[in-house]
Image (tube, rainbow, N blue to C red):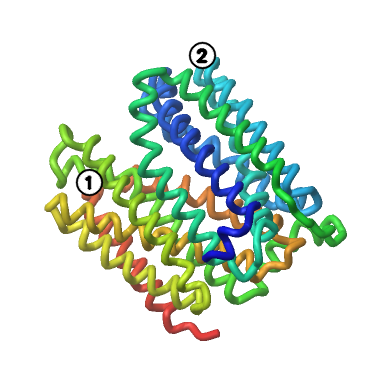
């Protein structure tokens, strides 16, 4: 771990994502408040996720190909500056149409940012430390979850949504400035025929057994978690204190999940030499059992403890996929592989969100959790027995 802390590049990156992460939480809450004021009300919040994910689905493989051929440092700086522009623009939009257009633009920039970060991280430090690095990144994300929502809620009450958007824009400018201090030695990208360019990411995923199976598991995890996350609000209102306490208790649940993410990120590095597929399968099994326990429990302090364990397992799941892709993919193809993965995984989360919303109208929420967990358990058992 000490070797990671000696990497000035990586320390700069961690500081940057912490600052911009807090800013992004400001925009998340401020944007939800803004769109609910327009015609359509709360349904507009779902439109945010849908419109932001569409560019990722359409552009995923194309932007990965583009990023592999460009300077990662400059690309990272430019995209963060573009995010600053969208944040400032949110502050002045006055209609749902304009707001959704800006969300689409933000989705386009996000489609670029994800493969940029995947390809950038291995350039910031020694490749043998990728597991520890991704764990630390997830820990920072956990800190942002714990601090960000509480900070955002208080600050938006003081300065309003417009002020929150402006601060988020400033946070993106700050990470862009910090990133100028990266000292990287980037190699040149392999030149391929156009057709080979666009299918190379798919080929790497399908031809590498570790990446292929972990990618397939990640699709399932994304589907389950994206479905369950918004239903937590309904579950809390029904079983954990009623609608009066819902907002406060949901906030506590996600805060404890964030604490779990911090712990998970710190300890993940100790498992970086383990078989990643076995580790991910074990996480699936444990997560399924924890969610079932959460589903049948009505004692709120125990729910908090279970949610913190879910945060740990969530961190392991996210870190494993990222680490395997970075370790097993040729450096000159990282953007393409990441672009392909994100073009599949991100839209799955939106589809899951819609299915969960419809299902909750016909099935009691706790049974949705239990059914999904049983599927997760059996998939974990299936891959636990798979040999490489």
Q: Is residue 361 visible?
A: no
Q: Quadrant of residue 238?
A: top left
Q: Is residue 232 visible?
A: yes
Count of marks overlaid on the render: 2
Taking the image as shown, residue 315 lies to the left or right of residue 288, namely: right
Q: Are marks 1 and 2 in contact (CB under 8 Å)?
A: no
Q: Position of residue 317 (x, y in %)?
A: 45, 63
Q: Is residue 145 above or below residue 169?
A: below
Please tell me which residue lies in front, 126 or 27. Answer: 126
Q: Residue at x 53, y 69 (%)?
A: 214
Q: Which residue matches tag 1?
A: 235
Please tell me which residue lies in front, 57 or 260. Answer: 260
- Spatial CA span between label 1 and label 2: 34 Å
Q: Is residue 332 above or below residue 78?
A: below
Q: Position of residue 65 (x, y in %)?
A: 75, 53
Q: Which mark is residue 71?
A: none
Q: Position of residue 373 (x, y in %)?
A: 31, 63
Please tell me which residue lies in front, 1 or 358. Answer: 1
Q: Residue at x 51, y 14 (%)?
A: 94
Q: Residue at x 24, y 58 (%)?
A: 306
Q: Secondary structure at mark 1?
A: helix
Q: Quadrant of residue 288?
A: bottom left
Q: Position of residue 319 (x, y in %)?
A: 50, 62
Q: Is residue 68 above or below residue 43?
A: below
Q: Which residue matches tag 2?
A: 94
Q: Residues within 10 Å of mark 2 (few under 14, many from 20)?
A: few
Taking the image as shown, residue 184 lies to the left or right of residue 109, namely: right
Q: Secondary structure at mark 2?
A: loop
Taking the image as shown, residue 326 lies to the left or right of residue 17, namely: right
Q: Residue at x 84, y 62 (%)?
A: 190
Q: Is residue 227 above or below residue 324?
A: above
Can you say which quadrant of the picture contains the C terminus? Answer: bottom right
């Amino acid at each position: 771990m000490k070797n990671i802390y000696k990497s000035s590049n990586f320390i700069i990156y961690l500081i940057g994502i912490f600052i911009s992460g807090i800013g992004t939480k400001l925009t998340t809450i401020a944007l939800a408040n803004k769109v609910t004021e327009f015609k359509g009300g709360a349904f507009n919040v779902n439109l945010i996720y849908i419109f932001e994910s569409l560019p990722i689905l359409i552009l995923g493989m194309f932007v990965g190909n583009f990023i592999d051929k460009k300077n990662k440092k400059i690309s990272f700086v430019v995209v963060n500056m573009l995010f600053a522009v969208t944040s400032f623009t949110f502050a002045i939009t006055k209609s749902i149409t304009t707001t959704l257009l800006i969300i689409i633009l933000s989705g386009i920039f996000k489609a670029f940012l994800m493969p940029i970060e995947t390809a950038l991280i291995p350039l910031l430090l020694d490749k043998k430390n990728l597991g520890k690095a991704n764990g630390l990144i997830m820990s920072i994300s956990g800190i942002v979850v714990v601090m960000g929502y509480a900070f955002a809620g208080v600050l938006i009450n003081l300065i309003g949504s417009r002020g929150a958007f402006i601060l988020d824009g400033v946070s993106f400018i700050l990470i862009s400035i910090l990133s100028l201090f990266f000292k990287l030695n980037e190699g040149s990208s392999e030149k391929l025929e156009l057709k080979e360019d666009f299918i190379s990411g798919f080929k790497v995923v399908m031809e590498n057994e570790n990446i292929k199976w972990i990618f397939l598991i990640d699709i399932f995890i994304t589907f389950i978690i994206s479905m369950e996350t918004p239903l937590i609000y309904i579950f809390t209102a029904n079983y954990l204190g009623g609608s009066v306490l819902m907002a406060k208790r949901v906030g506590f649940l996600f805060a404890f999940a964030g604490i779990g993410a911090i712990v998970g990120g710190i300890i993940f590095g100790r498992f970086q030499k383990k078989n990643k597929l076995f580790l991910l399968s074990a996480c699936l099994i444990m997560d399924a059992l924890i969610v079932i326990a959460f589903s049948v429990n009505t004692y709120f302090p125990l729910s908090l403890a279970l949610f913190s364990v879910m945060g740990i397992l969530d961190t392991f799941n996210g870190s494993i996929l990222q680490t395997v892709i970075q370790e097993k993919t040729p450096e000159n193809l990282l953007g393409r592989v990441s672009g392909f993965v994100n073009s599949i995984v991100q839209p799955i989360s939106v589809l899951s969100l819609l299915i969960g919303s419809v299902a909750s109208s016909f099935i009691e929420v706790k049974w949705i959790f239990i059914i999904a967990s049983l599927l997760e358990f059996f998939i974990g058992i299936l891959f636990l027995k798979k040999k490489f």
